[in-house]
Image (cartoon, rainbow, N blue to C red):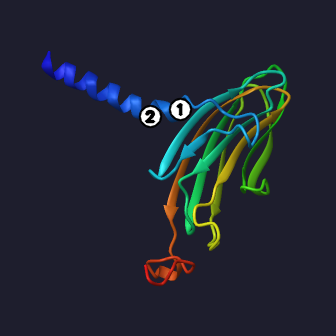
Amino acid sequence: MKKAAVILLSITLILAMIQPTLAQKPGRDFESAPEIDLSTGSASLRGSLTGEFEDNHYYKLVGLSSGMKVNVVAELLGTGEVSGFTTIALYSEKGARLAGSDQALRRGEKIRRELTYTLGWIPGNPSPILYLRIGKSRGALNYTIEITVEKVDDAGSGRDAGMDPSQ
């Protein structure tokens, strides 16, 4: 009985840590995008674009630094009565599209898309922000997204070329 209580408590604590990211209500635009903190190295998102006028979900990716590679793996499942056109894309703080994929998606069809973007060094912006957009026109879809970040060093030097040499 004591072992079962410990297992149940462990599961509850794990779910409590995971749930805020999974249950994060997406924004409808850049300004309303909720923050997803990637300082821990990863995040998971789930959502659905099913409403007739619900075309986009936005997330604000924070906890980043120069020299990081951002990897986004998305699985999209078509659920609408009609085929739709889907988009998954990464944007800069100023709204410029940096990487993305656009594709038709039929009902019952499942597609997997991977996006990768490596942040450069910008002295005036040591903690850059990216935005993730999942979009559709017509149809409906469910999505599952895994976001991971990794530090990328230049030429095996153990540091990014843009880093302060005193570090």
Residue pointed to by mark 2: 18
Residue at left 47%, top 80%?
156
Residue 22 is marked as 1
Q: Nearer the viewer, residue 167 or 16?
A: 167
* Residue 118 occupies quadrant: bottom right
* Residue 127 occupies quadrant: bottom right
Instruction: In the rendered view, tell whether residue 15 sits above or below residue 63.
Output: above
Q: Measured from the top left, where is residue 154 in percent x and y?
A: 53, 79
Instruction: In the rendered view, tell whether residue 116 sits above or below residue 132.
Output: below
Q: Nearer the viewer, residue 4 or 15?
A: 15
Disc 1 residue type? Leu
Mark 1 burial class by Cα count in 10 Å: few <14, some 14-19, many 20+ = some
Residue at left 75%, top 34%?
28
Disc 2 residue type? Ile
Most extreme residue toward the top is 1
Q: Measured from the top left, where is residue 130 in percent x and y?
A: 66, 53
Q: CA distance from mark 2 to mark 1?
A: 7 Å
